[in-house]
Amino acid sequence: MTSTSDAMVMLVLLFLSPFAIGLLMGLDRKLTARMQNRVGPPILQPFYDLIKLFGKERRVMNNSQAVFGVAAMLLQLAAFVILVTGGDLLIVFFVSGAGSFSLVLGAFSARSPFSYFGAQRELLQILAYEPILFMAIFAIGYREGTFLTNGIGQDLVVVLPLALLALLPVVLIKMEKSPYDIAVAHTEIISGPYVEYSGRYLAYTEIAHWFELGILFGIMTLFFQDPNIYLSIAGKIVIVFVFFLAALIIDNSTARLTRGRMVRFTLAFGMTLIVANILILFLADKGVFR
Amino acid sequence: MTLKEKMRMKSPWILHFDTGSCNGCDLEVWALLTPKYDVERFGMVNKANPKHADILLLTGPVTKKTEDRLMTLYNQTPGPKVVVACGDCASNGVPFFDCYNVDGGIDRVIPVDVYVPGCACRPEAIIDGVVLAISKWKEKVAATEMVAAEENKAGAPPETSASQEAKP
């Protein structure tokens, strides 16, 4: 936010990121299809789906469902804007969390057993990934002494590799990938919290999901920064794609686990790695390894 | 046809419902999702949810027990929507047309847009049927947009006249 070139980069990021996330979702479907020996949909398919949904008949179960669906999108959008404009990571985390919770409330507001199942499971997912995401942000703050995204230094991936690795289950949960696609269990409870949404309101929740993913990948790209802007961008893209491909491979080679195992594994794995990472940093600061 | 409409036609989401079929046609419907036929390359996804669906693929003669459920599913699907009756039983109820527990074809209960023949109908025939259904869907989208535009036109003058009356 200091110079005009920075402002330009922010504007470009702000307008191009939603398209980039949409393309990433399309690539996800294409690669999944190729892994299953299918041809798969075009890479622009998520955009076709959204345009189709906006043309459908307007139908809501009740007003609060529609309001929570739109609120989920607006909160995620707000969090995304704060992240891109170099705001506070903690505020990003809490506003995005409010967006996720808004989706849960929307699912609870429709009197449907599938929607209730989905909402309960979404809450369990939040219980599983929020502490890990929070601890990862805390580790960044501990290392850098600030939570502002534009105050973050260069060597995070070197000093906090375990904290970055701990985000892998979080990526799986947020991308709704097996073995942790607990809420939108396709063959089991249809589409969980999204089940009672239709038409444009389904599109709003889908856009909310895109921004949610954008925030997660955005936080992960903070781990690599370089004075050379091209190297910086390349490194960020490499981080996103490594996690994206890992999620795809895990998705196509595993079956869905129970919700209890998701919460236990995610918390145990993530907490252990991040606490170990912070401990090593702390001891290194005290000069133990010298 | 605008680019927007072209893009809309590339995302037909499917609801498959068995109204009392012998499972022959159902197997063929599911075969569409396998690597051999892979209908996802046309953007078709089996959503298993009437609220997300655009095209209803229905199989089997309508039994008395599934009649209400079929009506519910049809009413829960937001328009514009297209109904495809897959197989001979779904088309006219043969060979169960005069059974005491069967209504007959799907069109006895809800309006059908496309009939796919065959016992069981071949996956290629279902793909042909869905392609036909997409062209029907295109017509329905155009029709709903015309109705909406006319409603807007019809709705607009009273508002303006009311506002003009309000302004002395």
Image (cartoon, rainbow, N blue to C red):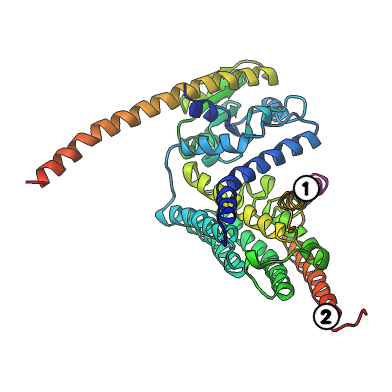
* Subunit bearing disc 1: A
Disc on res. A285 = 2
Q: Which residues are magenta?
A: A246-254
Co-location on one chain, circles 1 and 2: yes
Where residue A152 appears, as percent x and y from the top left, is 69, 66
Where residue A216 appears, as percent x and y from the top left, is 66, 57
Q: Name the residue at the top extreme.
A: B117
Query: Which tag is nearer the camera, tag 1 or tag 2?
Result: 2
The residue under label 1 is which amino acid type?
Asp
Q: Is residue B112 visible?
A: no
Instruction: Name the foreground residue: A129 vs B127.
Output: A129
Identify residue for label 1. Answer: A251
Place residue A289 in its image quadrant.
Answer: bottom right
Disc on res. A173 = none
Place residue B57 in its image quadrant.
Answer: top right
Rounded to the nearest angstrom, the CA distance separating label 1 from label 2 is 39 Å
